[in-house]
Image (spheres, helix red, strand yellow):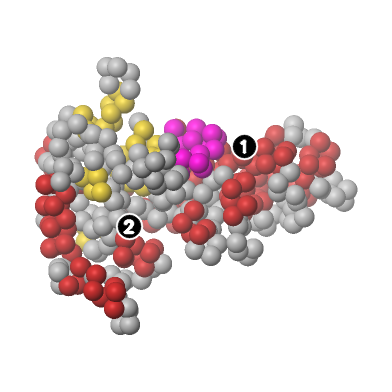
Amino acid sequence: ALMWSVFLVVVLPSVTCTHSQGRFTIARKKSGGWTLIDPLGKPLFVVALNHLASPYYYNLIQGANGFVPCRPYDTVCQKLDLFQNKYHGNYTLLTADFVRNVKSWGFNAAGYEFIPSPDIHWPYLPDLFITNASHIFQKFGGQQSFPDVFSKEFQESTDARVAEWCRTDLYINKPRVQQDVIGYYFEDQALWNVTMARLAATNSSNPSDWVVAMRSLYGNESGKQAYINWLQTRYKNDLNMCRPVYQIPASIQSWEALRDFNFAHLDVFNAKVLHDDNAFLGVVAERYFSVASAAVRKYDPGALVFGQRFISHDMPIPVIQAAGKHFDAISIQPSIFSPTNDQ
């Protein structure tokens, strides 16, 4: 199923969560395509608004508690701070007014970054914030990061994080009403394209992309071992075939020894390296998506997995193939937000 998640999500009748009727699902149409199905069993064309919680979003993912107030000197923020000025810091009043308004405007759901209320049932798609491997963090001074998805620690931390977010909506620190959830996202504007990431890199202390991150790990770390094992298979166990491409010194005479090589002087824009790196992205995505999707289905078995929100100009084929195996829908945001853009 294909969903344009920035402005539209697809549905036919207007939707109201009816808890006795079950959950949102996906089904094949007679025409051969796919459609979302609402809890009443009807085809769903979602028209949703995102970012109700944007003023509080980044504070939450940095680990702070509660909402972010305006700074004392920021008079513009104070003037425009509807949450405090109109709703007196009461998220239930805010959500009730939001739902009432958007219903009257023809919307039938919220997208992501929505502040729910246990007393107001409205479909939405919460974020799980599993990694910082995002164009958003890259733009914030190169704060992107790429965890070792092959490690036991990643599996355990992802399991714990998903368990917490499926159980509790941390925007309001109350139990999540899972029947309101259409599906879960992992993160926004996923950063995958290695060429794009390397050209845009601004912080040399952080790896620019997934492959550089795995290649830079120590030899005893799971991600580095997975990368070297993959390289060995790709080059048919012929280290001498691999040597000129990756500038491997003659002193390294085995694949096992290559695990401790740091690839520090590698030309990451070499055409062959880029071709290999793009293929290895599929291995990373397969591992990441399998771990995170399994955790969602473990802790909220009735929910759909929407996974990552991709940008239309950053969708490497190996990554999308992995997403197709593990996600219930693939979400794509237009690269340029303009009504005149052909995308």
| Residue depth check, mark 2 versus mark 1: number of the one nearer the observer | 1
Q: Which mark is residue 19?
A: none
Which quadrant would the C terminus be assigned to in this image?
top left
- State yes or no: residue 318 in magenta: yes
Using residue 206 as the reference point, say whether residue 341 is left or right of it.
Answer: left
Badge 2, how many Cα within 10 Å: few under 14, some, many 20+? some
Residue visible at 40% across and 55% down in the picture: 129
Frontmost residue, 299 versus 126: 126
Frontmost residue, 284 versus 336: 336
Disc 2 from disc 1: Cα separation: 33 Å
Q: Is residue 306 above or below residue 80?
A: above
Marked residue nearer the N-terminal end (2 or 1)? 2
Label 2 SS: helix
Quadrant in the picture for residue 279: top right
At label 2, the amino acid type is Glu
Residue 217: % across, % down = 65, 56
Magenta stretch: give its range.
Answer: 305-324
At label 1, the amino acid type is Ala
Frontmost residue, 278 versus 263: 278
Q: Which residue appears farthest toward the front when viewing the image? A: 340
Label 1 SS: helix
Which quadrant would the N terminus be assigned to in this image?
top left
- Which residue does the numbered mark 2 point to in the structure image? 164
Q: Which residue appears farthest toward the right when viewing the image? A: 250
Residue 219: % across, % down = 69, 54
Q: Which mark is residue 279?
A: 1
Badge 1, how many Cα within 10 Å: few under 14, some, many 20+? some
Whether pointer 2 and pointer 1 mark residues with C-beta atoms closer than 8 Å, the reply is no
Residue visible at 70% across and 46% down in the picture: 269
